[in-house]
Amino acid sequence: MEISVGHTPDSDDAFMFYGMFTGKVQSSDFTVKHVIEDIEKLNRKAVNPVLDVTAVSVHACAYIPGYTILRSGGSFGIGYGPIVTAKKSMTLDELKDSKIAIPGKMTSAFLLLQLMIGKFEYVEMNFSDIPKAVSDGKVDAGLVIHETQLSYEQEGNKKLFDVGEWWNDTTNGLPVPLGINVMKTSLGTDLISKFDRYLQDSIEYGLKNLDDAMEYAMQYSRGKSKDLIEKFVKMYVNDVTVNMGDSGEKSIRMFFEMAKENNLVPDFELKIAP
């Protein structure tokens, strides 16, 4: 059957889907039509299910009851995650009273920062516009994701806090839940399991053919150097990406338990593939 698959124009997503989208890893069950959108657009599109499979922020799962989380393809930080940047140093208390640029209200980065510092004044913008907004003084601080986590110094900003480090310390080392892939629950557990395996095969193929997969991923480098993109991909395509395992599942469940306790997400049923 043909299924629609959404992913972001980001190098780590491209790396994961390299084997699948180039036909180097094939399936007797699926042909794939892929759709590329910014993560926050995919989050919003998933509220009224359009795509059969899509990348979303973990946070978005609180608002997309029609989907089941796949066990493969997740972006988890291992002791690191989104960072808060600014032009000048600032204490945590000063940050709480600042205007902070965020990459979208449904991103995991936004929910993680709320868990860390409480509710705050924010401005939504495309993640790639945040560094300039910070350096131009349009906002006091910026919550940055993707490769801008690594390029803030080049953009004239400084790192204040790593939200992933806070999560790591708070949860005794659980991986930082950031992005995942989901599939329409209505397609049934059999098809969900088969696609989950297909995606896992694609990720493993990329890891075994690192140079070729990196070359493919570079089409989404947004002008960043190959060394920086390779560092970024290796940060977010890791063992938990291949299969989230017990630690990944536990981190997602704890993420939402904490969010519900702080009244940051509605009550909902979390569905994770077996």
Image: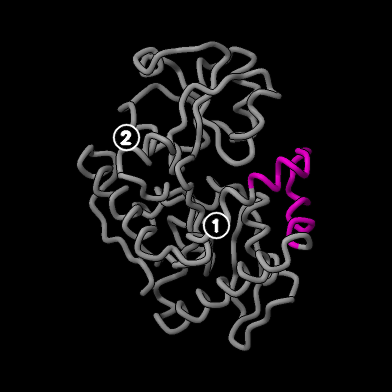
Residue found at x 46% / y 64%: 182
Amino acid type of the residue tagged 2 in the rendering: Leu
Residue 232 position, x and y percent, is: 63, 45
Residue indicated by mark 1: 238
Q: Is residue 99 above or below residue 189?
A: above
What separation in Å lies between label 1 and label 2 (alpha carbons)? 25 Å
Most foreground residue, 160 or 127? 160
Among the two numbered marks 1 and 2 on one chain, the one whose residue lies closer to the N terminus: 2
Circle 1 — which element? loop
Residue found at x 28% / y 50%: 254
- Graded by Cα atoms within 10 Å as few (under 14), some (14 to 19) or many (20 or more), the crowding at tag 2 reads some
- Graded by Cα atoms within 10 Å as few (under 14), some (14 to 19) or many (20 or more), the crowding at tag 1 reads some
Residue indicated by mark 2: 115
Q: Is residue 218 above or below residue 150?
A: below
- Dominant SS type (magenta): helix
Q: Quadrant of residue 249?
A: bottom left
Q: Quadrant of residue 172?
A: top left
Circle 2 — which element? helix
Q: Quadrant of residue 79?
A: top left
User: Range of the magenta residues?
Assistant: 213-232
Quadrant (top left, top right, bottom left, bottom right) of the C terminus: bottom left
Position of 153 compared to 252: left or right? Answer: right
Residue 28 position, x and y percent, is: 62, 88
Q: Is residue 227 magenta?
A: yes
Amino acid type of the residue tagged 1 in the rendering: Asn
